[in-house]
Image (cartoon, helix red, strand yellow):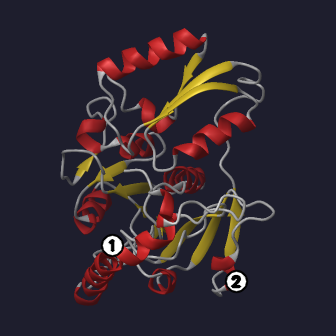
Amino acid sequence: MQAPEFWYPRTPAHPGRGLDKLWPWLLSPLALLYALAGWLRQLFVTPRAVSVPVVCVGNLVAGGTGKTPAVIAIAKQIRAEGTAVHVLTRGYGGRLSGPLAVDPACHDSSDVGDEALLLAEAAPTWVARERYAAARAAIHAGAEFLILDDGLQNPHLAKDFSVALVDAKRGLGNGWVIPAGPLREPRRLGLRRADALLLVDAQDGCETETVATTALPAFAVSRQPALAAGQLEGRRVFAFCGIGHPQQFFDMLHGLKAELVGARAFPDHHPFTTAECAQLRADAAACGAQLVTTAKDCVRLPE
């Protein structure tokens, strides 16, 4: 899904529609039920510990904040120090429930999800609906260190350290819980379980409310495109993606000084069809442009 516009307040120059302020109140009963269900889950589930360190990388809102690149960067750093690090992930969008070790030569995104395939390029990766079972399997396979991807709200596996990512430009939105807003749980409860914050793409004038209202250590990080400087500068491109916040990708292309002549956004984790790919190629050709997308979308393209 893509985030509804009312989840994120507009700027004073673009205040949005009147309904943008009304929708959270209309959806507040459902938001209360969602928050209550999450609170009860945390209350009645006892986390189980394992014999190796577990670091959790998660976030407080629905949608992408750069968790996958963060996990990859942390995994590469730990591997460089000679420690056998494995990654645990749910495998969102995949049909296999696990626990199983991801093999990019055998699995595709319909099996284990797009994120698992990207993570497996950086470190041994395990997909499982039950994270504790995945942790046990990884340790049996030789893991000395575990990174739990997107596990901040998962109470089943005990964590030694939890990092919460916050998009410094978008912040935590309107402050409401799903579906009235983007929060997976009330902000206070989520921050209580975090040990540090990573402010993604922090710049002057970015959202600082989260940092100002918590004593957690906060670190500014930025996402860098895996392209050589100037590779797209001045080139006509037609962009498409199926990620949580597609505008971030389109803005990145503008930042690379590409000439964005067309763009199409699909739902998050969208499984592309052959017909859709053919149409995208035709659209790009009609504009005399190069077709570009994200690494996460590439693994969901039909062969």
Residue type for callout 2: Ala
- Whole-number angstrom distance, CA of label 2 to CA of label 1: 26 Å
Q: What residue is shown with label 2?
A: 212
User: Can you say whether 238 is above or below 179 in the image?
Assistant: above
Q: Quadrant of the C terminus?
A: top left
Find numbered disc 2 in the image and state the secondary structure of the residue it sits on: helix
Q: Is residue 224 visible?
A: yes
- The residue drawn where x is 50% and y is 76% is 161
- Please provide percent x and percent y for residue 75: 52, 54
Tell me which residue sits at (38%, 20%) in the image: 277
Q: Residue at x 45, y 85 (%)?
A: 189
Q: Is residue 213 left or right of residue 78?
A: right
| 82 up-or-down from 130: above or below | above
- Give how far across and how far down residue 88 sits, in percent: 36, 58
**For the residue labelled by badge 1, is the local secondary structure a helix, a strand or a loop?**
loop
* Quarter location, residue 27: bottom left
Give the residue type that dot 1 points to: Asn
Q: What residue did someone put label 1 on?
A: 154
Disc with the residue nearer the chain's start (2 vs 1)? 1
Residue 234, percent across and down?
Answer: 76, 21
Instruction: Quadrant for residue 185, please give it.
Output: bottom left
Check residue 90 in the rendering and tell me which mark sits there, or answer none.
none
Foreground of the two, 185 or 231: 185
Foreground residue among 100 and 115 = 115
Task: Give the x, y percent position of residue 223.
Answer: 65, 49
Left or right: 115, with 205 as reference point: left
